[in-house]
Image: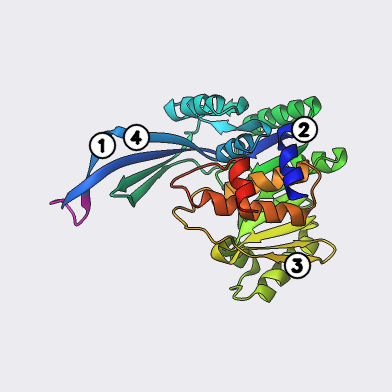
Amino acid sequence: MLNELIACFTRARILVVGDVMLDEYVFGTVSRISPEAPVPIVEADLERHEHVLGGAANVACNVRALGGAVTLIGVVGDDAAGKAVRNLAAQSGVNPAGLVTDPSRPTTLKTRIIAHTQQVVRVDREAKAPLSREVADRLLARITGSVSEGVDAIALSDYDKGVFLGNLPEAIVKRCRAQGIPCLCNAKPPNLPRFTGATVVSMNLREAEVVAGHGLPSDEAVIQTAVQLCGQYEFGAVVITRGGQGLVVADRTGQVRCVPAKAVQVYDVVGAGDTVLSALTLIVAAGGDCFSAAEIANAAGGAVVRKRGTATVTPEELRSLL
């Protein structure tokens, strides 16, 4: 059954909306400490400098790597990072036609300095203010246009960088419910109420604890929170990922399931939530229920953490962990 659902990925048409980012990796070596302050001096390797898509753009890349057709909708600045996002998306097979350029804000850029395989520091260049009304209206117009052309599911990737701080999430969820389109979200705690009525909402354990207002030290506590959120915000299902403890999924009828983590060597958890959201979206688009989606998403998360940096997963890698 699960393999049959994965085989349907190639027929899925997915729309990814959210906070678009560019991840930059600067590699080098450390041989001395700075005389100016007690910090290492990283001598950059001029031949090892990488850019990869992050945030909602990484969700879109994961959808494409798993076989789905995907259009990316979000905001970039009128800068080199924004141009890099467009180029990398096109190179990855992601349709970048939904990207809106906003000259008033920079493209979110996260620069990681890596020395001897260890991350030394991360520098974030970003704007977190809500989008202007004009830019938000342009995004909604892009979404409306894509929906009219036909989509099987919409994924909303919220990194609290401004895209979902206005009325946009409510408008998207309302449109999806009216047209019977599954809407899956990875929402940050402060914005969770804005996604009321979504088909599936995913979050990690730390985010779930913030929403709950206390720690969730047991399966029972996590399950209780997932069930409560379904009722409180009219979610079809809630998925809470717990790293090495697997994930918990609960639906609005009160059914729950704890899916154990796959036994894999963890190298890097960057972007694991993006991979989980992409797999959840594809499974639901293919007609699977939230429990099948959670099981496959759990395997997808297990596959991507075996890779360094922001990465994607292939259907073959996914099947190997099922």
Q: Residue at x 61, y 42 (%)?
A: 316
Instruction: Give the image's coloring scheme.
Output: rainbow
Q: Which residues are magenta?
A: 34-40
Q: Is residue 93 left or right of residue 308?
A: right
Q: Whole-Å distance between the Cαs marked 1 and 3? A: 50 Å
Q: How many marks?
A: 4
Mark closer to the observer (1, 3): 1
Q: Which residue is mark 3?
A: 228
Is 67 situated above or below 83? Answer: below
Name the mark nearer the viewer: 3 or 2.
Answer: 2
> Circle 4 is placed at which residue position?
49
**Mark toward the start of the polypeptide (2 vs 4):** 4
**Residue 132 x %, y %:** 61, 34
Residue receiving disc 2: 151
The residue lying at 62 percent from left, 30 percent from top is 135
The Cα–Cα distance between marks 4 and 1, rounded to whole angstroms, is 8 Å
Q: CA distance from mark 3 to mark 2?
A: 30 Å
Residue behind mark 1: 45
